[in-house]
Amino acid sequence: MAPRARRRHPLPALLLLCALLARLQVALPIAPPCTSERHYERLGRCCSKCEPGKYMSSKCTTNSDSICLPCGPDEYLDTWNEEDKCLLHKVCDSGKALVAVDIGNSTAPRRCTCMVGYHWSQDCECCRRNTECAPGLGAQHPLQLNKDTVCKPCLAGYFSDTFSSADKCRPWTNCTILGKKVERHGTEKSDVICSSSLPSRKPPNEAQVFLPGLIILLLFTSVALVAAIIFGVYYRKKGKALTANLWHWINEACGRLSGDKET
């Protein structure tokens, strides 16, 4: 009977293989994986992505890194990227009620919003004119930018008489403060109407009644004053001659009386 062959144990051989692989790993270190957002893996190596504001003109090779070029006018890229071209900025078309709130640059996109009086509608993906509140309703304040108008009924003491997407209800006019009386009460659609005249304003009318008499009195006083002045001037000129004549007559009378006594 032939002798049985000895069975070999593979354990020593495996241990030897592991030792050789460990030494090989020390001699040839394994390249780490590309985990950074600023790198990408290609041809067994980590290559640089392009920074925001630049696009990738050429990818990396075994001997060179990526080649990046800046975005052109009205273009942008806002992340580290491998893009072969930049993105175009949005156009804020005023004909579609759009305006730019941020013009953007090579590293940030342009942002548009609806003009004042418009709001963005998801239904049409466009700007729509804000709802106008009918008379008796007012816009709720503060107004929400880029949102439709919210209309609220006017409370007691307030009114709205126009169609408006921005005006809120206005308070009724206070006739008492104006010194007037209420001629017609207000509603949610109309203001209070105050009386146009008051009894307290009659004194100016009475003054108008006495004004003609006052004018006549002033005219009479002026005429009398002028007459007095004229008379005074006349008396000063004629009065001297009258006095001289009177003294001459007295002297003649006295002379005659003295002559009669002597005879």
Image: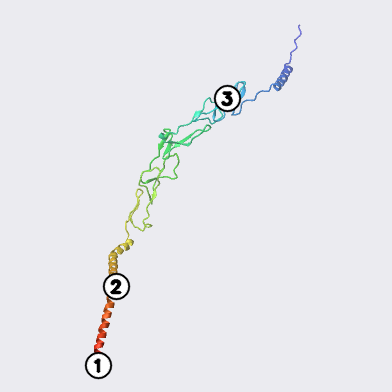
- Count every numbered label the image shows and give the total: 3
* Chain-order first, disc 3 or disc 2: 3
- Amino acid type assigned to the residue bearing label 1 in the image: Glu
On the image, numbered disc 1 is attached to which residue? 262
Q: Residue 170: image x %, image y %?
A: 39, 49
**Residue 69 at x, y = what percent?**
55, 27
Q: Secondary structure at mark 3?
A: strand
Quadrant of the drawing holding the N terminus = top right
Measure how far apart labels 1 and 2 are at the Cα level: 46 Å
x and y percentages locating residue 241 in the rendered image: 27, 78
Circle 2 is placed at which residue position?
Answer: 233
In the image, taking residue 115 as reference, residue 196 lies left or right, namely left
- Establish if 126 lies above or below 198: above
Helix or strand or loop: what does disc 1 sit on?
Answer: helix
| Residue at 26% across, 82% down | 246
Closer to us: mark 3 or mark 2?
2
Residue 25 falls left or right of residue 129: right
Near mark 2 (Cα within 10 A), the count class, few <14, some 14-19 or many ≥20, is few
- Residue in front for this viewpoint, 66 or 4: 66
In terms of depth relative to the viewer, which is nearer, 262 or 226?
262
Marks 3 and 1 in Cβ contact (< 8 Å): no
Q: Quadrant of the C terminus?
A: bottom left
Give the residue at x 27% y 75%: 238
Left or right for 112, reference 199: right
Q: CA distance from mark 3 to mark 1?
A: 163 Å
Task: Decide: is 64 above or below 142.
Answer: above
Specify the quadrant of the image occupied by residue 118: top left
Q: Amino acid at mark 2?
A: Val
Mark closest to the chain's N terminus, 3 or 1:
3
175 vs 237, nearest the viewer: 237
Q: In terms of image quadrants, where is residue 244?
A: bottom left
Return the residue at label 3. 67
